[in-house]
Image: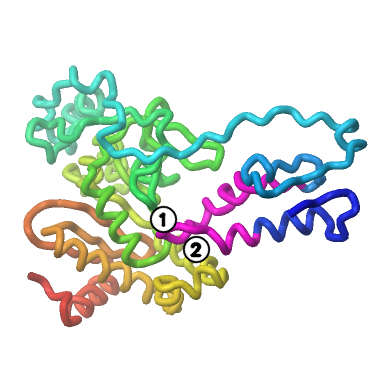
Amino acid sequence: MRLNEGSKIPLAVTCLALCAAAACSKKGGTDPEIGTIGDEIRSASMCSLDGLDVGIEAANPNVEIFVPPAAVEQKTVPAKKPRMTDKSISVGDLPVASWFDGTDYKDCRGLNPRKGADLQRMMADCKFYDPNGADGKGLPVLDLRGHYRDKLGPYFKVRDFARIDPNDLKYINPGHYETGEDGIAVHRFARISPAIVALMNDIRAEVGFPIFIDGGFRPFYHNVRMYRGYGNGDIKSKSRHVSGDAVDVDLDLTFKTLREKCDDPCFAKSGKGKKACSLKNKPVMSEHLFGTAYEIMQKRGGGGIGMGDTQMHFDTRNGGRVATWGYNSWNRKMIERLMKTPGRGRR
């Protein structure tokens, strides 16, 4: 394709056509996720509104763009910094926090967060204590700085498992998190279980649509402060989030994105896309997500699923069975009904 000054098709229109073509011709084994396809198209085409800064030839040597000489004289295009690529890594590739190995949490085990003196000591000395770990340390606490964009499997990134619910920021020490340009806050230091990474990628692959995690790891002190903030005296000090093997999924955003994705014929006509787009409302989507996760956990030998109206909790606890619970009576009734579905009963 050659575009020049005498072309009958305006350059901006041609750029839009190229971008649209890139969206519907993406190759590979999986569909592109909503929210990342824009970056992929821009990096492939770099279409510019003014028609002067066009770099398609840099990404595709078969496409040549000719800009009128006068335009080149009027504007000098500065050299672009190379776009950071997202590396595919495993949890084991992430560095352990430099202070972790020298930290001893054995004395934290006998403390009671409901007692004032014990709570003060916990907040000072037991910030990353893991009550589910044999020695109070559990999985290593990882230093995630500089790795948030790295991919953990085909569908998720490091930051997904360290994401912080905006409502929780008041419970976290300022030096323990940072906020990206997109406004998403993430933990600088976190435990991430390889099992929860594998589980979430398996669930995402099976349901066939994007799943949005809005909360993953929580430091022990964050978890205690959060439950104390609820004011009901219930402090869940042994949360799986503290161990780094649990996530919460935002059902509202997941369903909203599914509906948007179904507007794209490239997705809606695909195999899993066609099935996903038949889920007409959020409760039906939630049931499908719950049932899919339950079956995968059964094959894996255990796990936990908590159903709420706006969130769904997943964890990889051991025990040989899948623990299920609802956060209100409606959710509990829905789970009871699902458990009677052939093939999904308790083992």
Q: Is residue 43 one of those drawn in magenta?
A: yes
Q: CB atoms at circles 2 and 1 under 8 Å apart?
A: yes
Identity of the residue drawn at 38% across and 49% down: 156
Mark 2 residue type: Thr
For residue 54, side relative to residue 270 (left or right): right
* Residue 19 in sight here: yes
For mark 1, does the 10 Å Cα neighbourhood hold few (<14), some (14 to 19), or many (20 or more) residues? Answer: some
Q: Amino acid at mark 1?
A: Phe
- Which residue is tagged 1? 212
Q: Which image quadrant: the N terminus? A: bottom right
Looking at marks 2 and 1 on the same chain, the residue that comes earlier in the sequence is marked by 1
The answer to whether one can see residue 163 in this image is: no
Tell me the element at label 1: loop
Q: Is residue 102 above or below residue 5?
A: above
Q: Position of residue 257 (x, y in %)?
A: 50, 63
Mark 2 crowdedness (10 Å alpha carbons): few <14, some 14-19, many ≥20: some
Question: To which residue does mark 2 refer?
Answer: 257
- Answer whether residue 173 is magenta in the image: no
Report whether 293 appears left or right of 35.
left
Which SS class for mark 2?
helix
Q: Which residues are magenta?
A: 20-48
